[in-house]
Structure formats: structure tokens, C-alpha cells
Amino acid sequence: MGDGDGWAVCGRGHTHWGRFGASGLLVFHRDPEDGLVRVLLQKRAWWGLGGGTWGMFGGALHSHEDPVTGALRETSEECTLDVASVRVFGTRVEDHGGWSFASVIGDVAARQHVRPASFETRRAAWVPVAEVDKKRLFAPFARSWPGLRDVMARVVLVVDAANVVGARADGWWKDRAGANARLRDDLLRLNAGIDRMPEGICAFDTCFPEVVLVVEGAARGVEPIEGVRVVAAPGSGDDQIVELVSHPDPDAAYLVVTADRELRARCTAAGASVTGPRWLLDLLKTPG
């Protein structure tokens, strides 16, 4: 039993389980053969709150836990899903005033056979998205499902390295490769999550994007590092970026960082969102 187990009263006067709030995991999988998207749901045990209804795996947070850690822990305690295989894309938070519930959204590359692992779970099932509403849903999940269904995607942040480096006053003109490598290293900070996404991209409260740095010219030798994918353009960096966003993954939302007007227009025409370097550089500023 964790230190978060217990009841709490929110600012609206409602009673919730979880002294320090709660979180749940909404994990999905797209079948590579027919494209059908399924979400993993839990049928709650009859004896508990919302007994016999369907919803996300999840529960009370411990005092030291962030929502992602808590959702993955609770899921691993309640079913046999290998939570290490989950790619977390973002969170949506319902703030009730002094108490909150965070929905953690992610996917798995392979649809695993999942079984109950605790007395809290009666069944576990991969349910096609179109059939979720046909289930008898746990009331809080039923209220949040319409919004969650719209954010089941990962954000791919594509950075136009030449353009962004040119916006930094760090002597890039003396050592282009070095400046690109410094930008690559700074981008690692985004792995901790982004709380200020531009409008028009997935409506996560916290987003954990896949970061892609596109380099060209003298910077082609910059190596990738864990957490930042580096793509070396064989020719024009602009052409490489447009190529990347023109063949999108159906579960991906592309955000290109550049101030180049022509590139912005080409990316928008390809269906990607765009934002300028200032948004990114503000995120990368060293605190204090």
C-alpha cells in the first residue's frame, strides 16, 4: 500500500481516491495490416468503485511520483502489459482544484496478450476505438474519452538546424558543425517534457515529442544521440524536411521549427504545423 492510498476532497467538494492525485494510462496500438486502432481497457472488479465498468488502468499517485511514473506503475500492478514497451507521448490533466487526474497517452509497437494481474482487474481487453462508446464505461473515463480520443498521437518536432542555429548568437559562423552539435545537446532538455506547445498541435498539457534535427552542409557529420535523432540532408536541408513531413505516420503530428518563409509554406502545404525558432529557443533557455 502506497502513501497516496486514501481519499481526498477537491476544491469542488467532491471526494476522490488518491491523497496526492491520480493518473491512468491510455495506451493504443494500430494494426499494421488493417490500420485498426485499439485501446487497452480495464474492466473493474465488481467490488470496487465503478465495479463492472470499463476504463483506463491507473490509480493513486505516491507522494514522490510524477503522473507518468504513477500511471505506468499502477498499470504494471493491475495487468500483465509490459509497460517498458510503452512510448509515452503526452498527458492531459483534469484539475479539480487541489486534486487532479492525469491521463497518460502512449502506444505500443506490438499488441500484447494482456491478462489481469490483481484483484482490482476483472478483465483486460484491446477495444477498437469505434467500439469504446458501446461499453459500459467508468463515469470519469466516459467524460474524458472524447477529448482523449483526439490526442492519441505522437508529436514529431522537426528542427531546421541551419535556421535555428542562425538565430543563436554563439559564434556559429566560426564553427557550423560545433554550433549544430551544441543545439543537438540542448535539445535533450525537451525529453523531460514540454508544457508550452504552440496552438494547433496536439492538445497535451505536457508533451514528450520525438525530436528530429535536420542538418546540412558542414554539419552533416553531427552524430545522433539518444533522445535526439539527427538526419543529415544529402542536399538541401529544406527539401529533406519537406520529405520527412510529406510521408507522415498516421499517428504522428509534425511540428517544424523554422523561420524560413518558403519552407514554412511548403511544410504547411504538406499538412505539418510550423513555429518559429524563438519558441524553441525560449524553451531551451537555462533556468535562472
Image: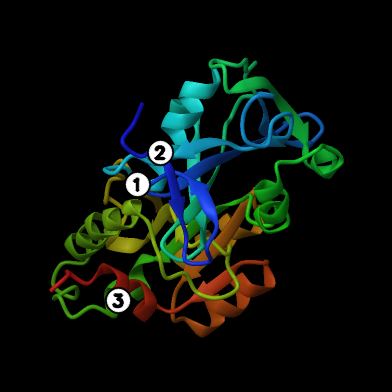
Q: Residues within 10 Å of mark 2 (few under 14, many from 20)?
A: many
Q: Looking at the image, can residue 155 be seen?
A: yes
| Closest to the observer, 62 or 14 | 14
Q: Are marks 1 and 2 in contact (CB under 8 Å)?
A: yes
Give the residue at mark 1.
66
Label placed on residue 70: 2
The residue drawn where x is 28% and y is 78% is 166
Residue placed furthest toward the bottom = 261
The residue drawn where x is 53% and y is 17% is 118
Q: Secondary structure at mark 3?
A: helix
Label placed on residue 9: none
* Residue 186 placement: quadrant: bottom left
Q: Residues within 10 Å of mark 3 (few under 14, many from 20)?
A: few
The CA span between labels 2 and 3 is: 29 Å
| Closest to the observer, 166 or 78 | 78
Q: Quadrant of the C terminus?
A: bottom left
Q: Position of residue 233 (x, y in %)?
A: 43, 56
The CA span between labels 1 and 3 is: 24 Å
